[in-house]
Image: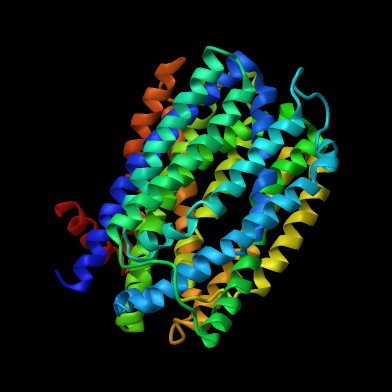
Amino acid sequence: MNEKQSRTQNAKRNIFWGIVQKMIGLFCPFLVRTAMIYFLGSLYVGLNGLFTSILQVLSLAELGFGEAMVFSMYKPIAEDNKEEICALLALYKKIYTIIGTVVFAVGMMLLPFLSTLFEGDVPEGVNIYILYFIYLVNTCLSYFLFAYKSSLFVASQRTDIKTNIGTITMLAMYALQLVSVLMFQNYYLYCIAIPVTTVINNLMIEYRAKKLYPEYIPVGKVSDDQIQDIKKRVTGLFIYKVCGVFRNSFDSIIISAFLGLTILAQYQNYYFILNSITGFMLIITSSIVAGVGNSMESESREKNYRDFTKFQYIYMWLTSWCTVCLFCLYQPFMALWVGENLVFPTEIMAIFCIYFFTSQMVNICYVYRQAAGLWWQDRYRPIVESVANLTLNIALVKLIGVSGVLLSTIVCLVFINCVWGARILFKHYFVEVSEKGYLFRLAYYALITVFGCTLSMAVARLFAAEGIMTLFVRAVICCIIPNIVFWVFASILPERKEAVALIKKMISR
């Protein structure tokens, strides 16, 4: 099998198993979350979301080192340079041990200030400090227990192995959590299941890596020039990760601090659905990034640009369709799932849909910036976006509540992330092409999506249905109308023919 075929097959395999994991990762958390709402109460859902967000902030200590290491492994793996790979693993192991220690120390220092992040009631009989400690231990365990070995699977385009191990341990974790909630109504047991399965997952990663790649052991020393190159990339990645944390984790923290755990629980319920779909989209981008990186090493920039437009077309088709599905199905689903009292007004639901679309439309551009290693060149944009997002969050949450938090993120995504991020890619890699064509396409995809939402909802309102039948009718409509709309209106784009050919090729194999 030639290199190009290998990239296609790896991407296809990674996407397939990623979808399997995501299906399980969507259904099981849904069951657990539903059990928590009805057996423990919505405050526990908000508490769970808050702790997760706090630990995501602490994980900034990772600095994006893992992604930088994976990028550094592309070339030695392609050249089968075992000595260099082993040296990189040794460096990776050393740095992750330091990171785990730093995260634990900083996490413990935050304990006295934990109560300031809560507005209103906390679940009765719950010690937030013990729960926080459990979450902190779970975060640190990953760094200490063979986390560096997972980079081998990613860099060699075998994320399906890592995915399958994660699927097994994830099933075990959700089973334990469900038992904890349904049989014991005990949130402490629910939390303890997380670090237990983290240990199992990392031990399985170590076992599979040792069996599949016995020649790769953490020994040797990386050259000074390469260390300097990694430091430069890590700096750019760290700044980018700060932006991601400000965009996601700080939203939950700010809502908890200003609006309380009950409103946070509502927000987390909507965000859970949105994030589940985002997870499916992430399967695609994470599955192709190593192949894109390999292609950038071996193919011309003209060929890579054609691939870029093809991937963007396919990805935006999926994004447009998912956005229409959210717009039509969000409210009736939430009413059936959590009850009318926890359903946001339609206007806020529509803003969630815009949030989803704008967060996804930049992802293919990010994949290519990531594969090209442009983190250092992109270092200023995340700083500006983070400051603007946090400032707008605090200002608007006081004025218009949850809508303000979402709108501040949307504004930053469109005017800073999208436009500036595209400029970085086209200035430093696709140097012979202007980013204006790319931005025009995104605007056109947005118009197609708005029309798809409007037409689909208009058709849905022609059919009188109640309860679960509303979901069924609207789901059928969403399977037909938005895809027809995209197919018709996106036919004018020149990359449509190659994109459709690629889809047929992957399906036929």
Hey, which quadrant is residue 472 in on the image?
A: top left
Image point 70% across, 45% down: which residue?
A: 54
Image location (x, y in percent) of residue 218:
44, 67
Closer to the camera in the image, 221 or 505: 221
Image location (x, y in percent) of residue 9:
22, 60
Q: Is residue 408 left or right of residue 461?
A: right
Rendered view: 157 above or below 342: below
Q: How is the image coloured?
A: rainbow
Image location (x, y in percent) of residue 209:
35, 56
Hey, which quadrant is residue 180 in on the image?
A: top right
If the image is split into quadrants, where does the N terminus sit? bottom left
Rendered view: 22 above or below 237: above
Image location (x, y in percent) of residue 450:
50, 47
Rendered view: 458 above or below 281: above
If the image is split into quadrants, where does the C terminus sit? bottom left
Q: Is residue 481 visible?
A: yes
Image point 44% across, 72% down: which residue?
A: 219
Image point 40% across, 43% down: which residue?
A: 166
Q: Is residue 52 visible?
A: no
Rendered view: 412 above or below 184: below
